[in-house]
Amino acid sequence: MSYSQEIRGQEDRDLSAVFARAAEPVNLLKAQRQENTLYGFLRPLDHAEDLPAIECLAATIRYGRNDVVVLGTGGSSLGAHALVALKKNRFSHNNQYPRIHFPDNLGPDSMDALLSELDLAHTHFLIISKSGGTAETLAQMMACLAAVKEMLERVQNGRQLSEYFTVIVEPGDNILRRFANRWRLPIFDHAKDIGGRYSALSVVGLLPSAIAGLDIRETRRGARDVLMNCLETENIEDIPAAIGAATIYHCAEEGMNINVLMPYECRLDMLARWHQQLWSESVGKAGKGTTPVRALGPVDQHSQLQLYLDGPNDKFFTFITTNMNGKGPVIDDKLASDPELGYMSGRTIGDLVAAEARATMEALSRHNKPVRQIKLERLNEYSMGALIMHFMLETIIGAHLFDVNAFDQPAVEEGKVLTRQYMEWGRRMH
Ligand code: PA5
């Protein structure tokens, strides 16, 4: 496996009763595997038949494109964004072609800016919505379609509207599919039995990844290895996702119902955002659950660490670290020749980040806070797939422990219905 997990501060706790319950969903998965009825989001991991079509479509979309815009929100954007972030660094998000944009947080100014700054003739729009009815995605799509239509009428380059859009939506009758058919836009099916927030390893996350030039076979392989480890390990107390879920549940029972996820790596910032949605929507219901909070190291040491160390004892901490030692520019103190800088001399930026992560975890442990470290050997497509699978398994096991349904989101749906009502009222008032 490409990662290891170590939990400190819980050594003397007896979790056997929690582990006994954690074994139930894992046994269910094992039985599903025997019967060939694995949950939709796990099924594609048993084979790779869908990958050639995704790779082929990605190659077509990449060709001659400067920009690709992913229109989707929540589960229809976060997984892809987390994966594509592997190609980015914090300061130059757009250093490779095609540049991939995720305007997932709808805003009038950002939408205006996106449409005016893009060279629409060399842009492709990927429209992703499982239900095909999410207002933000439909509104963005209509704005983009109008802009591309206007551009085509102006430049007369002989291209068709359909060459600028690809739609991913579930089969059956829905608004987006009707719209795509009306404008003859190519459609790729979003499997009906894969929920939005569990779709990162399906076409939803892998098509944008392949367009970004990532090796999606490696992503799948990393995820598959974690899934197989879970399905083939006999002792529940040896399965990392079960250990994670059991510890989170136990901590919550002791009043630590905030879960901080703090990677010490810029490219994992989006993964923490993806995880926040996955856990919140899957486990937070019926008055139960824990609150996922995301932080980023080392920058948030200068923002939240005071609270974490010295505030209420209501948190379980997860750190994700990569091997940073020896990486990045070497710090040379000759320019300053200040003895106070001597401790950094000859070390690298990576050494400093690694020391900071270690110091933060150690300080929390000294304050008797429960700390988990997930250590990646390398950050790449394989380990991203592994992390995504780890957290998805941890989430479904966690939901079982909290006795909630991991796959519905009634409160989110309620918000969508109300938004529609307010828009209709607003229209009547005009
Ligand atoms: O995980 C979920 O179910 C949600 O977050 C959805 O992904 C989000 O609301 C977007 O829905 P849709 O993909 O139907 O547009």
Image: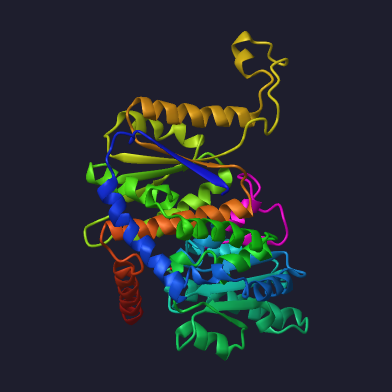
Q: Residue furthest top?
A: 339
Residue shown at the point (43%, 78%) measured from the top left: 133
Q: What is the x, y in percent for residue 165?
A: 63, 77
Does residue 84 show up magenta in the picture?
A: yes
Which colour scheme appears in the figure?
Answer: rainbow
Which of these two is toward me, 389 or 61? 389
Q: What is the x, y in percent for residue 162?
A: 66, 83
Compared with 283, 202 (above or below) is below
Q: Is residue 342 left or right of residue 231?
A: right
Q: Quadrant of residue 112?
A: bottom right
Q: Is residue 92 visible?
A: yes
Residue shown at the point (22%, 62%) measured from the top left: 286
Q: What is the x, y in percent for residue 48?
A: 62, 71
Compared with 177, 256 (above or below) is above
Q: Quadrant of ligand 1?
A: bottom left
Q: Is residue 265 left or right of residue 131?
A: right
Which of these two is toward me, 398 or 264? 398
Which quarter of the image is occupied by the C terminus? Answer: bottom left
Which of these two is toward me, 299 or 155? 299
Which of these two is toward me, 275 or 222? 222
Across the whole image, how many numbered discs are drawn on residues?
0
Q: Is residue 38 visible?
A: no
Main secondary structure along the magenta-highlighted residues: loop
Does residue 376 show up magenta in the picture?
A: no
Compared with 353, 170 (above or below) is below
Q: Quadrant of residue 160?
A: bottom right
Residue shown at the point (42%, 55%) measured from the top left: 234
Q: What is the x, y in percent for residue 355?
A: 54, 27
Q: Is residue 116 left or right of residue 76?
A: right
Looking at the rendering, the stretch of residues picked out in magenta corresponds to: 83-103
